[in-house]
Image: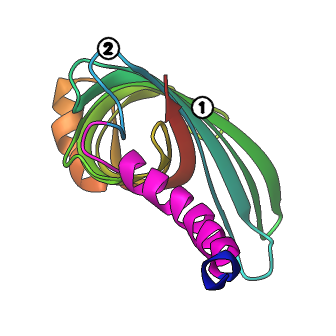
Amino acid sequence: MNMLKKAPLVAIMGATLLPAVAMANMHGHSSIGPNQGDREFSLSGTGSSSKDFDNSSFGISADYGWYLSDRTLAGIRQSISYADVEGEGLTDDFWNGSTRGFVDYHFGQNAARPFVGASLGAIYGDGVNDTGIAGLEAGLKYYLLPTTFIQARAEYQFLFDSGDSASDNFDDGAWAYTFGMGLNF
């Protein structure tokens, strides 16, 4: 009789522990993250605004890539940004875009995966001269599910028209930050 009273409690405890065991298995070495040959799609955003919201900008970036190995991702990135700039006698809107190829190398095999990489491509639009763009990047992906992650990335980008101007312009680069999510398939 005493055992019958405890049976519902044991069943509830077992049902509660089952998802925890499943999550522990999901975060194991071989079940989380990409494998060689997998593809990846991610969507990230960025934005900024002055304290009075006079000058604002926002952007979106989409990445599509292929895993050359479990750790090396090569792909293409499309970014679009909008800026609303106000000043003395100046009110203007700028649309800019960039298309870049990139290669990233990922470290670790757990849910948190730091990465470093580089990109090369072109920038174009209203607020910039159409020109080449190159950059170095670092970031972190965190897998919430075996194939779904959130990510943060910082890119140091510089513009150039030729090989000579690339080395001259490296010191005049700018930082770009993004936060988003993605999936492997």
Left or right: where does residue 112 sit relative to residue 54? left
Left or right: where does residue 178 sit relative to residue 67? right
**Residue bearing mark 1:** 97
Secondary structure, mark 1, is strand
**Residue bearing mark 2:** 37
Left or right: where does residue 132 sit relative to residue 20? left
Examine the structure image and report whether residue 26 is included in the region drawn in magenta: yes
Q: Residue at 35% of width from left, 45% of height from top?
A: 157
Evaluate if marks 2 and 1 touch, with contact meaning CB atoms under 8 Å apart.
no
Closer to the N terminus: mark 2 or mark 1?
A: 2
**Do we see residue 119 in this rendering?**
yes
Q: Mostly what secondary structure, the magenta segment?
A: helix
- Mark 2, other Cα within 10 Å: few <14 / some 14–19 / many ≥20: some
- The coloring applied to the image is rainbow
Q: Which residues, given as a range, are shown in magenta?
A: 6-30
Of 35 and 48, nearer the camera is: 35
Q: Residue at 65% of width from left, 77% of height from top?
A: 9
Give the residue type that dot 2 points to.
Answer: Gly
Give the residue type that dot 1 points to.
Answer: Gly
Place of residue 24 in the rendered image (x, y in percent of width and height, measured from the top left): 39, 56
Rendered-image quadrant of the N terminus: bottom right
- Mark 1, other Cα within 10 Å: few <14 / some 14–19 / many ≥20: many
Of 35 and 165, nearer the camera is: 35
Place of residue 50 in the rendered image (x, y in percent of width and height, measured from the top left): 70, 75
CA–CA distance in space, label 2 to label 1: 29 Å
